[in-house]
Image: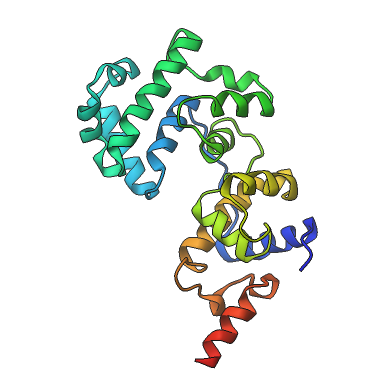
Amino acid sequence: MTVDRRRVRAIHRRLEARFGPLEPPRSTDPLEELVLTVLSQHTSDANAERAFESLRAAYPSWGDVVRAPSDELASVIRSGGLANTKAPRIQAILREVREREGRFDCSCLRDLDDHDAREYLSSLPGVGPKTAAVVMAFALGRDTIPVDTHVHRVSGRLGLIPPRTSAERAHRVLDDLVPDDLKTPLHVELIRLGREICKAGRPRCEACPVRALCPSAPQVLGARRRR
């Protein structure tokens, strides 16, 4: 199945009809969004937000977060999972931002173009393409499509990325393929599709609003009929 922007727009229209239009992204502080996104790695949004609220309640300032013993910080953010990894990573990011900016503030990102903002974020300790893209989309209002596990899986099944494409390469492929005005909405729609219908273990193709546009659906449904 040929991938072009017309098919991407058709997929978006059907997903929007199913899930409703995307609410305008909330305006957030870039550094807060960055820390929250680190906490969201390999866990649910609810767990990440709970961990972020615990962090802000325990430490009134970013300086307090940096000065805290790593094991203490890990205990505070335990609900976000992988706390022993995320705690020192967050502290390293905060130290690097203070070193560069002289304070705990990433608002300079708002004055950078997309390339430079992505480069700045990606150069911070432990910040990969997905984390950088989330901050750009939801804190800076830039047109970018973050690729998490759901987006990666679903875009592969839909044939939007080639087979066996890594998550890192998928960012580049989807960034080139998806029209700017659809990048953030499609990111959210693919996540919802992945969570509710196009699940990792057993995709519910029979309930999928984009089944007719999906090259994987006939294979999945055909295999089920033969059982």
Image coordinates of residue 128 in percent, x first then y, are 52, 36
| Residue found at x 68% / y 49% | 174
Residue occupying image coordinates x 55% and y 62% = 19
Left or right relative to 69: residue 151: right
Q: Which one is in front, 60 or 153?
A: 153
Give the residue drawn at x 57%, y 79%: 220
Q: Is residue 50 above or below residue 162?
A: above
Quarter of the view holding residue 111:
top right
Vertically, is 101 above or below 70? above
- Give percent across and percent down for residue 155: 62, 59
The percent position of residue 209, horizontal first and vertical second, equals 61, 71
Placement of the N terminus among the 4 image quadrants: bottom right
Give x and y (percent) for residue 24: 57, 43
- In the rendered structure, the answer to whether residue 42 lies left or right of residue 112 reads left
- For the point 39% across and 48% down, which residue is it? 42
Toward the viewer: 143 or 92?
92
According to the image, what is the colour scheme of the structure? Answer: rainbow
Which residue, as the protein is rendered here, is positioned at the far top? 102
Relative placement, left or right, of 188 versus 177 is: left
Please tell me how many numbered marks the rendered image carries. 0
